[in-house]
Amino acid sequence: MDARKIIFLFGELPPDLDPDDQEVRHRLVRERVFADRPVVDDGSPASALIVLQHQSIADQVAADDPPEVWQTAVRLLDAGLTPSFVMANLFLAANSTFVSRLRSGGAVDHVEYRRQLERLPLPPLREVIGVLLPLLRDRRAVSNEELVTAVLARFSASDGDGKYLEHWVDEAVDAVLDHDPSFMMLPPDLVVHVPTILDGAVLTHRLTDSERSENCVHSGADLAALLHQSDRL
């Protein structure tokens, strides 16, 4: 494997490790995935699938099969994108093709895979979040479909790209929900900005006997929305 591929996939490697050995390569990929994304190392089937997809991409890069995978990686690297962001893009293209195969029950559609690779890069997650936050703050509730439409409009994507970008938008929504408690998800697919919903609202709560005796109020279902305020109570 040439040096640039090694740096892209693994970073610096000790000289005694042979990345052309599939067993070694897969072990290195697994270690790299868990180092970059510790939360994935939970032993779940989803975690195993993420590792498997990254190992498959590494095999494709190593073997130049299909050649478009490494060609796409070089194109994105030459554009100044970081190896981790390039790998994230390759993963999304591979995963989209994999999911399509599962849904159809057929073989991998190599033409579709190449088409997904040609679409890369997707916008950085921080830029997607930059589109989402103002929209969520201005509206009481926004559906996932509306969020996808807003991202498509912002990045001048074609209507046909909506399904492809949906996973990226979902990642951005998850990041917002994880980092800002003022946003929350309501079933089936509504994202809401809690302070906007609470603006002008009056919440009531009937004190229970235990609350009276303990001299405190439990934040149960009646007052749960207050837990999603950004400001400390």
Image: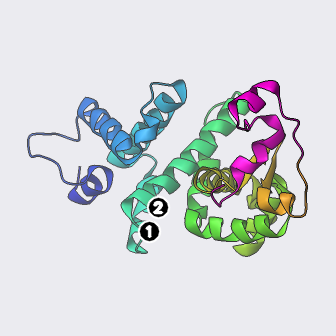
Q: Which of 205 and 201 is in front in this view?
A: 205
Q: Which of 117 and 192 is in front in this view?
A: 192
Within the image, what quadrant is residue 218 found in? top right
Q: Let me know if residue 156 appears in the view.
A: no
Three-letter residue code for mark 1: Arg
2 and 1 marks in contact (CB < 8 Å): yes
Disc assigned to residue 107 = none
In the orientation shown, which residue stands out farthest toward the left? 16
Q: Let me know if residue 163 appears in the view.
A: yes
Within the image, what quadrant is residue 217 found in? top right
Three-letter residue code for mark 2: Thr
- Find residue 130 and report its horizontal and vertical position in percent: 64, 70
Q: Is residue 163 magenta?
A: no
Give the residues in magenta: 204-233
Q: In this view, does 207 lie to the left or right of 10?
A: right
- Find residue 73 and report its horizontal and vertical position in percent: 42, 60
Q: Residues within 10 Å of mark 1 (few under 14, many from 20)?
A: some
Q: Name the residue under label 1.
A: 75
